[in-house]
Amino acid sequence: MQQKLCTPVLNNFEKLFKSKKDYDVIIKSGEDDSQKEIYAHSVVLCCQSNYFDAALSDNWAEKENGKYIFKKPNISPHILENVIRYLYCGQLDLNTKNGLDVLKLLVATEELGLNTLCDYIQEFLIENQEELLQNDTVGILEFAFQHETFTKLKDHCLETICQNPDILFGTDKILSLPVHILESLLEREDLVLDEIDIWNDLITWAHAQQPTVNKDPSEWTKDDVTLMENTLLRMIHLIRFHDIPSKEYYNKVVPYENLLPKQLKSEIMKYYLASDIIQIGSLPSRSSNIKVDSVIINTQHLALFAGWIDRKNVALKKNPYKFNLIFRASRDGNTPEAFHRKCDNKGATIVVVKIKGTKRLVGGYNPLDWVQSSSYTKNTQESFIFHFNDYRDTNTGKIGRVINAANALICNNSWGPIFGNTFTKRSYDLVMNSDCKWKSTPSDYPNLHIPKKFRIKDFEVFQIVKR
């Protein structure tokens, strides 16, 4: 109803713009042969735009024969005409324009201080110019960084590269990437790339900035070290060194240890030698689209668990599951009753157990639920157990998929989680019994060499929900 009242008014303003009746502003748009005069009304421009309100003030504006003369040589006539028409009637058809013209229009809106239109055009580009953005994501990102108000476009390009890092990382495009853009990418938690690959690309980028420095760090002079330190000064602390396996660290990072601050080297050494540290520095592990509420695992574990759930032997770059923490023994109570109170009727879950006094991590995946049934047992071919020799290194993780599906799980209200259920032998592949003791005897799953009896530091259960 309201639209019916507005439409005639806006139509009249558009007629006024087209008729040029009683215009008092001449805008000279473009340069040389492409220059064109655009006629408008100062009252409309000043009402709709703070930029024009200031530009057409007595202190700034040039006048000839009672008309304001305004020059915009850097904005082409057809772009500026579209902007001025929008100020009159609120109409702008972006679908009729090619991607380059839309980008030029976007630049014009920033220069003219039209923030609402600037946001609108950015949203249009993201929603309707997918091919343009995909074909030159890095170029568009660099373009967006040149303009303070293009935050939506910048964030979209950053997210696109983080989810599809092959667009930039591992290519020659990264060699000329401005430092502030690379810094923005390395800051993000959703960069879907192994941390050691990020480190390798960072070193490659640094060498490109300092081409005179020897590629072999063992041959560096003190001046070379200083050059590379200054080049990487803003980047080193953005690397999640706790997500680089010790072997990779030794092979790929140690040769460049002279670039690391002394305090950081000390923290890294402590991390690799001590068993109770799960993070170096203040930055958490990266994740494509998830965060994890855990005192035991990080997002790299979740990516690997997701791959195992989908019957793949690798961590998934894009995690299709939410991992909702529903139970933590140290918080909710280390008893079977507390476990079932929190975990029954929650559907698929994964149990994660940290073995006390070691770096070992064990657990299992239940694709069904933990509700006790009349037979106690539950049949599934999708369950598995796992064992990490070093919980901080996902490369040490081993999976054992159920061998005997009929004996995959036991759900008993008096016991905690049970994987494998050979009652006659009192044998369970992984179990928390009624006395809150943990045991493991290979039976219905492969032998992963989990300790026969062990005490735990903590254990957690996550509900698995498909996104």
Image (cartoon, rainbow, N blue to C red):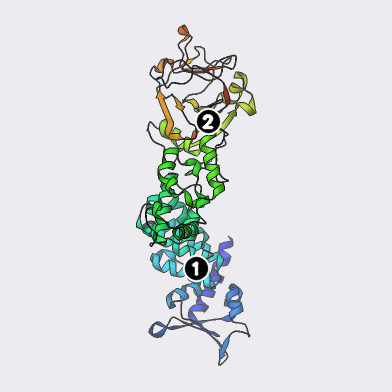
Quadrant of the image containing the N terminus: bottom right
Looking at the rendered structure, which numbered label has been put on residue 91? 1
Name the amino acid, label 2.
Gln
Please tell me which residue is depicted at 46% across the width and 69% down the height of the picture.
105
In the figure, is residue 184 to the left or right of 209? Answer: right
- In the displayed structure, 207 sits above or below 21; it is above
Q: Which residue is mark 2?
A: 463
Camera-nearest label, 2 or 1:
2
Q: Residue furthest bottom?
A: 65
In the figure, is residue 459 to the left or right of 28? Answer: right
Q: Circles 2 and 1: CB distance less than 8 Å?
A: no
Instruction: Inspect this view and state whether residue 13 appears.
Output: yes
Q: Position of residue 162 (x, y in %)?
A: 45, 50
Please tell me which residue is depicted at 37% across the width and 50% down the height of the picture.
166
Q: Nearer the viewer, residue 217 or 242?
A: 217
Identify the mark nearer the N-term, 2 or 1: 1
